[in-house]
Amino acid sequence: MSKTPAASEHTNRLVDETSPYLLQHCHNPVDWYPWGPEALQRAKDEDKPIFLSIGYSACHWCHVMERESFENEQVAAVMNEHFVNIKVDREERPDLDDVYMKATQALSGQGGWPMSVWLTPELKPFYAGTYFPPDNRWGRAGFVHVLHSLTTTWDSNRQSIVDQADKVVEVVERMSLAGDNLPLPAPDAAAPSLDLVDGAVEHVAGNYDHRWGGFGQAPKFPHADDIRLLLRQHVSVGDHPALRMAEHTLDCMARGGIYDQLGGGFSRYSTDEKWWIPHFEKMLYDNALLVPAYLEAYRITGREDFARVARECCTWVRREMVGPEGGLYSTQDADSEGEEGKFFAWTRDELLSVVGADAARLVDVAWNFGDEANFEGKYVPVRPRPDAELASELGLDVAAMHAALEPLRARLFEHRERRVHPATDDKVLVAWNGLMIGALAQSAAVLDEPSFLETARRAADFCLTTMRPDGERLLATYRDGKAHLNGTLADYAYLANGLLDLYEADGDPRWPEAALSLTRYAGEHFADDERAGYFFTSDDHEQLITRPRDLYDGAVPSSNGVMAEVLVRLGELTGDGSLGKRAERLLTLLEPLIRETPSAFSRLMLALMRAAGDGISVVVTDGDGADALHRVLAAHADASVAVARVPSDGVTAAVGERFPLLAGKTAQAGRATAYLCRHGTCKAPTSDPAALQRELLA
């Protein structure tokens, strides 16, 4: 569970919040407000600038800035005298995070968390940065120096601040509404051709690290959708270099310290080019995005180590990230006992005391404990070279090496469990739950793990009941019995997509029906009918300095990109051409932006590939032999093949009316039957797994 703030002589307005991040600051001497009418009105009434601090509970440098500045009485006194101070959990308010991150990037040339932004009472940003040390050091202006300097300028040269803020708002609007400057496509314009995907793949490949895998230099982020784009390109056109890049990247990440070699699950990023030393926080969304990438690679290559990584990530989720009501928690901290990485790092003596001296050579070679310590005098377990090379050095084959390591891994994990754990941010976010529902459902189908399916179902039920109390509008966040805050487009898109994955895994028609309902609500309240696509906030959302769109992929995929995928998938199920047409119109509108920076649109490219591809859907009825048919589908390399499950006697008339693809599909001669359809036209049914496999490859 999340850490509870210690008792203190100070208590500010954050004490009534549910966010663990905000509660971490509720006993600071800073007079913090949550974002809301009280704070914003005070800034206007007292004509004071706003200091807006945005972060999240697992953020290491957020903790550092709190200890250095926000817990300091003298620093707090300056803040309280001259500013209205507002704390925001960026995970609860991605809309505010999006708008003011753009401002931070425009003002400082970089972004990140903690995000520190100074606003006029009209909420216009005029100065920004990320982490500030308490005093001048490392070439950075100290926080106290910045506070005094901005106070002086506010009092003596207000107009310069107002002018600067107006210019920044113009930049933020241009960044947020990039699609507004593009020419409207003709009503009958066709979607872009797949050469757009070729350009995106080429752009991704241009950033590829041939030695260590991944894209770009340190710090390295996983870029899961870029990997999936490479895998889909290989399946689509036989692009073997694309497969090699994806496979190499997945292999290097799985062997590095960014992957928890003992407990499963990926950290947010690696601080080095080799993926060895992570920034230790674990995010639900990173793992939700990486699991499908490893599953797709497993389906293409048959590599069991890729299946193992996906399985272990889902096992970590079930073990550590499931709330009592079924919702999935958000993050785990990088720090424990005030020290980054302490939970995950080992001395060699401690390790040998657990595994025994007889295992010294095995762990020294296989987990790199015989080399120089790799993290602040300690070791983060990594597999330094490909498993075949490590096994050869040990005089073993790969299977024997893994068999020897497994009981040692279990003992080390059990020993590590007795340490003080990093804090868990136990709030439930609908958007991230949607991503992980999809990952768990896919894993259940591909790996034949019923427990993963049950976890996905519980999370889906939680999101559709507790987080949707009126049966229509989604709320975004939940903790301690309280669901609140308006959902953004990400909540609707990610959850709808996850529900469609869940339907493919268990065949319950509730899931596509809910996905269709969420999509219709988004169309009514988020869609930009004048142009294309969707706004990030609803038409009745709090008015910010601009209404963001969320077109580009970032740490999580563009919500417009995911919604485009949802539209294509629902179009396949319903036969409603208007759904696919909306996705095509968005792709057509954004084509100039995509050609300019194609690697920023990987999720949209996945939607385009699905829309322009073979459009294969397979409806499988229940009955004898169903498992064999599903094994064929689970092993098929093309993960974009849609799978629908129906009862042996077919769906009800009402379900068939909503989803015509399912209508009339029944078991033949008492056996499970597969109907393979391309763009709504179905071949003759078959109960023979070999025949289904031939049809898939035809």
Image: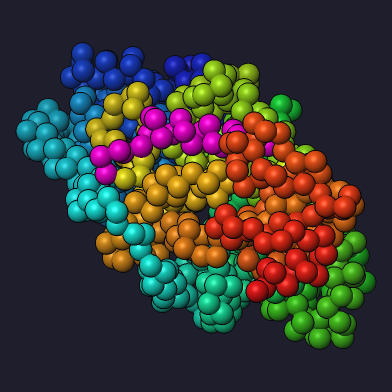
Asked if the stretch drawn in magenta spans residue 527, the answer is yes
Closest to the observer: 231 or 219? 231
Q: Is residue 398 above or below residue 70?
A: below
Q: Nearer the viewer, residue 549 or 207?
A: 549
**Magenta stretch holds residue 394:** no
Task: Pinpoint residue 102: horizontal percent, then vertical percent.
Answer: 30, 46
**Which residue is painted at 70% across and 44% down in the image?**
664
Magenta segment, which residues?
A: 508-531
Q: Quadrant of the C terminus?
A: bottom right
Residue 232 seen by the camera: yes
Is 155 left or right of 685, judged from the image as shown?
Answer: left
Q: Is residue 576 above or below residue 37?
A: below
**Residue 262, percent across and down?**
77, 57
Q: Residue at x 81, y 81 (%)?
A: 391
633 vs 663: above or below: below
Snapshot quadrant of residue 403: bottom right
Q: Is residue 107 left or right of residue 484?
A: left
